[in-house]
Image: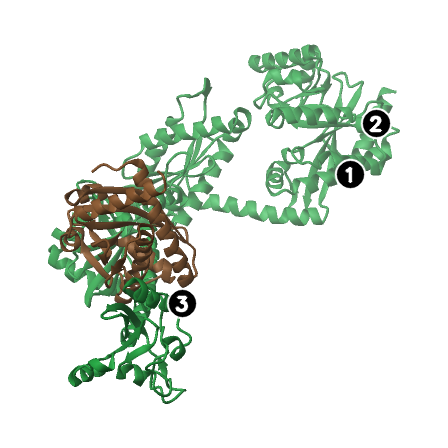
Chain colours: A brown, B green
Amino acid sequence: MQLSELQIDYIKELFNVGLGEAIVELNDMINEEILMSVPNFDLFEKNAIFEKLQIESDRNVTAVVLPIQGGMECNGILLFPAQHSLNLVRKVLKETSGADTLTALEVESLTEISSIILDAIITSISDMMHVSISTGMPSAYSGSFQTLVDKYYVGDTVMSVGMHFEIKDSQVRGDILFVQDILVIEDFLEKTNQMLSELGL
Amino acid sequence: MTQGNKPPEYLTEAINRTDLGMIVINCRREIVFANDWVKEHCTVEGNIEQKPITVVFPNLPPRLNKAMEKALNLRRAAILSNKLNPAPFPFYRDKQSVNERTLISQVVKIKPINVDEQYCLIEIIDISESVNRETALHQLATEANLKAEQIEAQEKRIRGIFESVKDAIIIVDAGGMIQMFNHTANELLNSAPDTLHNINLHQFLKEKNQPLSEANGGVNQMAAMLPLWAKYADSIELEITPYGKVSSFSAELSVNTVELSEQRHFVVVLRDITERKQYEQQLETMAKFDELTSLPNRTLLMDRIQSAIGRAKRFDNNVAIIFLDLDRFKIINDTLGHDTGDKLLQLVATRLSEEIRELDTVARLGGDEFVILLESLEHKEHAAKVAEKVVTVFEPAFNIEGHQLFVTGSLGIATYPENGETAYDLIKCADTAMYAVKDSSRNNYMFFSEKMNENARKHLELEAELRLAVKNRQFSIVLQPQLSPDKKILHGAEVLVRWFHPTKGFISPVDFIPIAEDSGFIEQIFDSVLDQACQFLAQYKHTLPQHFRMGVNISPRQFSSDTFIKRFMAVLDRYQLETCFFELELTEGMLMKRTDETIALLRSLVQKGFVISIDDFGTGYSSLAYLTRFPLHTLKIDRSFIIDLPDDEEAAQVCKSIIGLAKNLGLMLIAEGVETKQQNEFLAAEHCDVIQGYYFAKPMPVDNFVEWLNALNAESN
């Protein structure tokens, strides 16, 4: 499925608006300036995920999974390489020392932060596309990338948005992934096109 | 919940008994249900249901409010983690006591419920226990991290020291197997990194060139030796053979016991002491051998003599000491330089070493003094044979840098047991005998005799008496006139010194001048002589002929003294005399030393008005080339050339040559020791300028000289 540059720009903008909201909320909570950007967007089939994200299947990852219902049935996943999730949480919580893996309470915080980000993006999508989207409880995952894919990637298509956080001079990389049925994607793109034509583009 | 649809009682009971707080709010934010957990832990009085949640809990954080809004409006679920929102609801444990109550740590989950209308379920999970546990764990982890960092830092420091010391440090187990070692150990034992592990230390160690393993029974012995070394030895010197090498080096080991993992280990510190050993050996060599000739020095010689005496006692045989001093070595050193002198000493050392048995010792005491120790002699006469050989050693010339040098030696011999029981006594006797040779003939040898000791004793006695003589002014002068051969012109007089000892009477200058020269009294004697000479001049200068000169003998010691001229001038000032009255008589030997300085000194003397003459000309080592460079006025032919005149053809030729030489160089010539008319006539015929000797007059005390002078004046008138 090929997307035009216009479509891609529009979708990236959707995400940027959502992230902007998330940043406002996070900044209020942690009183620390966070910068976020969406450098890339991609759409690919599920089995191309290892190659596209350049993460080996047996690599340990941390992820927060948000079940999405209503206008867009899918799983929203915010995926971090293991060390990056640790950095993100520790920077946000201003903790300097501790174990080399996330504690249970830290996992909860990661879940909250990630769900705020995902929620803001969903809000942005639902607002702009005039669809109602509800969410279930976010949950955290830690383990091999392969297992994550097997467990939560229910559809056959992946919409991937690369994301960069910058907190206190520290770079954190994350990937926002929406895994869904191709029909959902087509619906999503159809709506995107509608929006673009409404805007006269 | 709507009243009409009341849930079954068991369900309400179950919800009330759960350990989490549950609040349900409707779309107007009113609390429609709160379970017992909420009521038990909140401090709000009265019924909280049917009231807006923001009224019941007025200070909820914005994040919670927003999450509830989203749940009700957008059906979004949310989680509020404890770390980001520690206690969104004011729920307490032990809420009855304000002082004791504690805020409950919470995780809050917001879940939209859509039944007939929109509701929102708020779950409050008490995670105080988890928080406490995590806090405690975190603290423990922090402390452990800190400890680990400290241990790591200390370990690094110790490693740093361990690796940077220049000594090899090796930790071995109780059996000597290497467990740990530093970089230096690897280097010293020539092993590749890590190959030392679990190798037994014994295989590197050698004792007295024998592997320790063989000498002491090997590995088992190692286990026995280590505790002994640790307990009783500060350090052990051993030989170490590095890995794969045949040669070994000297090492010093120190061993200490250390407990590691509750097992006895040993820390072996190993130091390469090769350099120290070499240095020690060098010091020992320096302490026992002469640097210039590599011969044994005095210390080693004394040891060897003492040992030889010990052996001679046991085996009832003889030891002989030959003391050798080179004749006139000083002149060679002074004229040709110390380098040549040193080379000569080396050649002499070589020749001497070639002449003696391996059993015997040639040593150098210093300067030009050598000692030969002869051991296990059947008869002491054997020493004479060796001495004769040594004398002949000097017959061929020594060829040094183009100079053909002829040197002889004077040898004194002392023997054990006749002349002494100690090394010191024997050396002393041999030395005395050597001096006896010097005094008589040189280039010869003599056995020590008691008479020599007697002479030496006399010498000491004389020295003591000289001291008194100087103090008591026992020296007087005599004057011997110097005249033209026809007796018509009085040239001057030589001033000679006389010592009248209160009990011993007249003592010959031949006997006391060398001693006075050695002991330094010569300067005081000269002062006395000069003073008396000046007295005479001051008193009689008006009756003396014009150009009258007093010849005064200057000794080598005075001539090399810095204050000589100054002192001389001071005396002349005192008597208001001019320098031209004095003819300074120097010997050839004095002039040949440090010639450049000598020329400068002579020039300054001449500039002051003194006249310089060479005394005893022909007996020393004059270099004729120098004669032209010195500002000389007079030559005095030695009496030994005059005594055989005129009949001895050879003596006559020598005299003629010297006179000819003086004439050619424009020097005045004085013949000393002229005793007969024939001698005077011969010298007159050869145009010798001045005659001094018994033929005209003996040396006379001042009063007699004045009488003689008066008589001479009367005669000529």
Disc 3 chain ID: B
Q: Is residue B600 visible?
A: yes
Q: Amino acid at mark 3?
A: Pro
Q: Are marks 3 and 1 in contact (CB under 8 Å)?
A: no
* Circle 2 chain: B
Q: CA distance from mark 1 to mark 2?
A: 22 Å
The local crowd at label 3, few if under 14, some if 14 to 19, many if 20 or more residues have their Cα within 10 Å, is few
For the point 36% across and 73% down, which residue is it? Answer: B88
Q: Position of residue B160 (x, y in %)?
A: 34, 53
Q: Earlier in the sequence, mark 3 or mark 2?
A: 3
Of the pair B317 and B614, the residue shown nearer to us:
B614
| Relative image position of residue B651 (x, y in whole percent) | 58, 16
Q: Which residue is mark 2?
A: B711
Q: Which residue is mark 1?
A: B532
Reading the image, the residue beneath label 3 is B62
Q: Is residue B490 left or right of residue B258?
A: right
